[in-house]
Image (tube, rainbow, N blue to C red):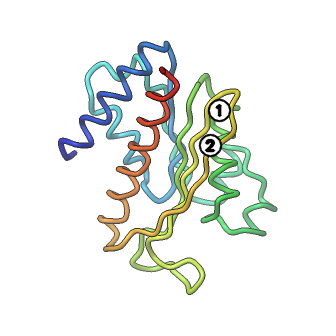
């Protein structure tokens, strides 16, 4: 179930994308498709939402999104480099204008001193522009980290698509 703020963000994203005649998709790891599910919970989202890829394993990131296995070995699957390649790979493999990618450690296991539970990398790619990549460190348990990732991704996407409209 989405909060009213999330529904408002999704509505705003949809309106902006429809006006621009653009489509978006998601490449999700730690959220397991939560962002795609939120977007498609809105009636009429098929006008602007094209697809969501859940690339939970390293192998799926390589096979489905073209993330180089060597890059994952070098930086780890939870890294800005991998998030960047996930977003750009989705754009390259689908008829999209926008791609939102997330990879992180939702917990409660899997964290380390350098990448604690709650570490999430997000990437937002648009055809013909540089990819925005950023890191978040969310607090709480698995549910809270995933929910915070959903909100952060939707907020960034909403700001970007509305900015492009100006």
> What residue appears at the point 67 percent right and 43 percent down from the top-left corner?
65
> In the drawing, does residue 159 fall left or right of residue 5?
right
> In the drawing, does residue 97 fall left or right of residue 147?
right
Assign a secondary structure to mark 1. helix
Residue 161: percent from left, percent from top: 47, 29
| Residue indicated by mark 2 | 87
Residue 101: percent from left, percent from top: 55, 47
> In the drawing, does residue 68 fall left or right of residue 101?
right
Q: Alpha-carbon neighbours of circle 1 within 10 Å: few (<14), some, or many (≥20)? A: many
Assign a secondary structure to mark 2. helix
Figure check: 94 above or below 104? above
Spatial CA span between label 2 and label 1? 6 Å
| Residue indicated by mark 1 | 91
Q: Alpha-carbon neighbours of circle 2 within 10 Å: few (<14), some, or many (≥20)? A: many
> What residue appears at the point 38 percent right and 29 percent down from the top-left corner?
13
Q: Which mark is residue 39?
A: none
> Which of the two residues, 128 or 58, is positioned nearer the viewer here?
128
**Residues tagged 2 and 1 counted as in contact (Cβ below 8 A):** yes
Farthest bottom residue in view: 113
Figure check: 83 above or below 77? above
Residue 28: percent from left, percent from top: 50, 49
> In the drawing, does residue 153 fall left or right of residue 103?
left
Farthest front residue in view: 166
Figure check: 68 above or below 78? above
> Which of the two residues, 55 or 107, is positioned nearer the viewer here?
107
> What residue appears at the point 48 percent right and 20 percent down from the top-left corner?
165
Residue 135: percent from left, percent from top: 54, 62
Determine the image quadrant of residue 142: bottom left
> What residue appears at the point 40 percent right and 51 percent down from the top-left corner?
152
Determine the image quadrant of residue 46: top left
């Amino acid at each position: 179930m989405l909060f009213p703020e999330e529904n408002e963000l999704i509505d705003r994203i949809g309106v902006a994308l429809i006006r621009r005649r653009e489509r978006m998709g998601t490449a999700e790891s730690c959220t397991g498709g939560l962002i795609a599910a939120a977007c498609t919970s809105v009636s009429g989202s098929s006008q602007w939402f094209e697809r969501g890829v859940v690339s939970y394993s390293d192998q799926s990131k390589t096979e489905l999104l073209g993330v180089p296995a060597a890059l994952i070995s070098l930086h780890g699957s939870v890294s800005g480099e991998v998030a960047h390649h996930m977003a750009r790979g989705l754009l390259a493999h689908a008829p999209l204008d926008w791609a939102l990618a997330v990879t992180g450690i939702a917990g409660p296991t899997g964290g380390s001193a350098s990448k604690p539970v709650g570490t999430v990398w997000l990437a937002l790619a648009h055809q013909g522009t540089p990819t925005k990549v950023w890191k978040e460190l969310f607090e709480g348990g698995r549910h809270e980290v995933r929910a915070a990732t959903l909100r952060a991704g939707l907020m960034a996407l909403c700001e970007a698509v509305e900015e492009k409209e100006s």
